[in-house]
């Protein structure tokens, strides 16, 4: 990621965190003036040897984060063309707590888990903790509760899980919405890389319903309010289970896990987390 972008995202995270862009934070954004990349010496190494820092993946002073910026308000492509959103601001603030730089790579949601430990160090993407994913990655402490929502055209008669049987249902590939459709009798999952494309096909009549997480569903509901309506999947008519978002980490890296969980706890404690919720989710 470009230096200007890192600085911009960090400045935003700090603005929302309510702290000034003091020297410490600026130093953190670009500790050795090389654009924030490949730091192997100097201030960054000192910071990295601090007890608050994470495991070996942070030896270069950089936390490489993967996301899929197609999931508002948690992540979306901002006006400057770079990932923005609650998760991005949160991971920037976590990096700041840990004393490392954060770079964010935008990739397909379905590739995130498999890329942890190679292309990226961790992933933050409104990712639900699931047993299946736990076979491949570890999860930080959860940071947000969610549930799947069902979106249908305003004039649709679909109003329950039973009504979804045999239907063509738009989902984002590899998401928990996709997994739910697998269990609906005779239903077909129309899989998209972007949830918004599923919603557009719903508006065009190509799918009967879309299943997607609550907050993005609410964003789409607002955007297309004359054309679509939403059902809370937690309602008795649908009976979907609660989900919990967490940061996905390489398996077995306890040092990194502790470092991230400590940073998350500190941000909850000092009010930063709640400010980010207000700024991005409850605005
Ligand atoms: N919470 C869902 C999942 O983890 C969707 C995440 C997303 O699309 N970014 O599968």
Image (tube, helix red, strand yellow):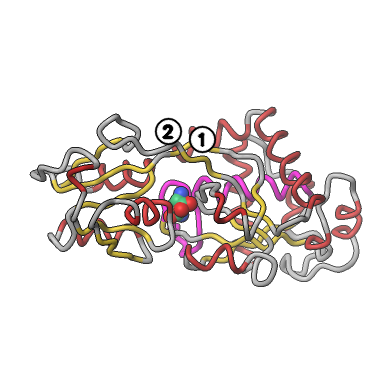
Magenta stretch, residue numbers: 71-98
21 and 217: which one is in front?
217
Which residue is the site of mark 1? Answer: 277
Q: Is residue 165 left or right of residue 214?
A: left
x then y, percent, for residue 177: 37, 52
The disc placed on residue 5 is: none
Which of the marked residues, 1 or 2, is nearer the chain's N terminus?
A: 1
x then y, percent, for residue 259: 78, 46
Does the residue at mark 1 contact the one at mark 2 (Cβ under 8 Å)?
A: yes
Q: Disc 2 beta carbon < 8 A from ligand 1?
A: no
Task: Name the residue located 60 percent from the left edge and 39 percent from the top edge.
Answer: 142
Q: Is residue 108 left or right of residue 270?
A: left
Task: Name the residue located 25 percent from the left edge and 61 percent from the top edge.
Answer: 188
The disc placed on residue 282 is: 2
78 and 111: which one is in front?
111
Provide the secondary structure element on which disc 1 rests: helix
């Amino acid at each position: 990621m470009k230096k200007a972008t890192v600085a911009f995202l960090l400045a935003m995270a700090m603005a929302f965190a309510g702290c000034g862009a003091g020297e410490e934070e600026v130093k953190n954004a670009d500790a050795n003036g090389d654009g924030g990349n490949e730091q192997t010496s100097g201030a960054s190494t000192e910071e990295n040897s601090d007890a608050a820092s994470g495991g070996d993946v942070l030896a270069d002073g950089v936390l490489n984060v993967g996301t899929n910026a197609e999931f508002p308000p948690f992540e979306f492509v901002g006006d400057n063309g770079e990932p923005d959103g609650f998760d991005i601001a949160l991971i920037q603030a976590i990096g700041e707590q840990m004393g490392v730089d954060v770079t964010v790579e935008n990739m397909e949601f379905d590739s995130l888990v498999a890329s942890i430990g190679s292309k990226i160090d961790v992933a933050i993407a409104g990712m639900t903790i699931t047993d299946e994913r736990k076979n491949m990655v570890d999860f930080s402490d959860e940071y947000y509760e969610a549930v799947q929502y069902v979106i249908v055209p305003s004039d649709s008669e679909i109003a329950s899980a039973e009504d979804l049987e045999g239907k063509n249902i738009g989902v984002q590939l590899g998401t928990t919405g996709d997994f739910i459709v697998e269990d609906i009798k005779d239903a077909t999952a129309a899989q998209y890389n972007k949830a918004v494309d599923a919603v557009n096909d719903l508006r065009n009549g190509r799918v009967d319903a879309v299943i997607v997480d609550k907050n993005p569903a609410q964003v789409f509901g607002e955007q297309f309010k004359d054309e679509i309506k939403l059902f809370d999947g937690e309602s008795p008519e649908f009976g979907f289970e609660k989900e919990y978002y967490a940061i996905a980490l390489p398996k077995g890296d306890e040092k990194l896990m502790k470092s991230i969980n400590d940073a998350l706890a500190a941000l909850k404690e000092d009010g930063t987390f709640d400010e980010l919720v207000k700024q991005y989710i409850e605005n």
